[in-house]
Image (cartoon, grey):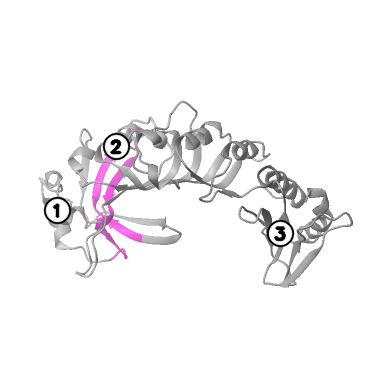
Amino acid sequence: YTFFLISRRTSLIAKSLKKRKKYQLRLIYNRFENCVNVFYPIASNWNFFTSHHHSTIGDFYQVISSEFRTACFHMVFPELSVLNLLGNLMNLFEVPLHSCVTDNGKVNHTLLIHWLNDLPHDKIEKISFSCENAKEFDYILKTNKKEWGELELFSYNRDNADSEESYNISNQFSTVLCEKATIRCLPLSRSSIINVLNVVELDIKESQLSNQYLKQFLRNWAAGKSNSRLNQAFFVINEPVQLKTILEGFPFVKKDPRTTKRYIETDAYGEKLSFWIFGGYDIQLHDGRTATLQWHKFQRKFEDSTIPLRWIQKYEDVNELENNIDRDAHENMFREPENELDSDQLPDLSFN
């Protein structure tokens, strides 16, 4: 279907929705059925779908009862057609693009990123790209002209997940602005992608991070060479955490867990999490701000939770930096258990 074959019906829908003060419109490209689904709230609960067959006298619709009205428009050449259709629908409904999410299938990112750049608004609230290799990520970041609210980058090609060379992302392009960046399944030991992304919140998981890499990130951040807007960062270290390596060269102040605590809110695979982390290590940034390095293993659910004696002993231990080198030791647990039934996990670090 061309846009003109569906415009008469969608024009009526748009006129009715424009009378409302607020409404939400969702446009979803269904790659498996080569169609565009349009979801929007309506007083009467029914769905309609276009016919699979081309018609010269108008569209045919199948009506199905539902909580939301859904329009499904089929097309023969989906990639370019769906982008043109989405652009026409956004103009018709007078709404900007809110988010762009690619699934685990192959997507023409060249076509997609150029279409996004041509949109009239300067910011897109959410971008989620699943790519096969670093060249695709490199092209997306290098070509992008928009500010992103939230950025998700992850690889669907697990066969290349351990190849550092395949993820050697260049830094020969301008900084990408976004509020929050989530990176998964990208070996980053030789990548400069973190320095390219100027974010407020950073969350990195399953990305083969090392103590040395984290140390270099801290050096660049503290010196003002990257991430000038960063307020909060989460890192999962894929080896035993060595504070001596991470903090080497930094003047720091060890914080008493009885007097220092930070409230944390974050997402974990779609689930909202909130907790408190106690203690930490303060380092000074070039602009006068203080950043606190904390371990998630020193977390509790409530602000007034009891502080274990072990935490106080670690704070008072002058040799603490040399004592956390054994992966199986208590020092390298994801968090100190509140009871013996809690299980061990990989070590996790955060900055605030």
The residue at the point 50 percent across, 38 percent down is: 177
Disc 3 target residue: 72
Could you tell me which residue is drawn at 79 percent across and 48 percent down?
Answer: 2
83 or 231: nearer the viewer = 83
For residue 49, what is the image quadrant? bottom right
> Do the CB atoms of the residues marked 1 and 3 lie less than 8 Å apart?
no
| Tally of numbered tags | 3
Residue depth check, mark 2 versus mark 1: number of the one nearer the observer: 2
Q: Residues within 10 Å of mark 2 (few under 14, many from 20)?
A: some
Residue 133, how many percent across, how many down?
45, 39
Tell me the kind of residue under disc 3.
Answer: Cys
Residue type, label 2: Tyr
Q: Magenta part of the protein: which range? A: 275-304
Per the model, the C-alpha gap separating discs 2 and 1 is 25 Å
Q: Which residue is mark 1?
A: 314
The residue under label 2 is 213
Badge 2 vs badge 1, beta-carbon distance below 8 Å: no
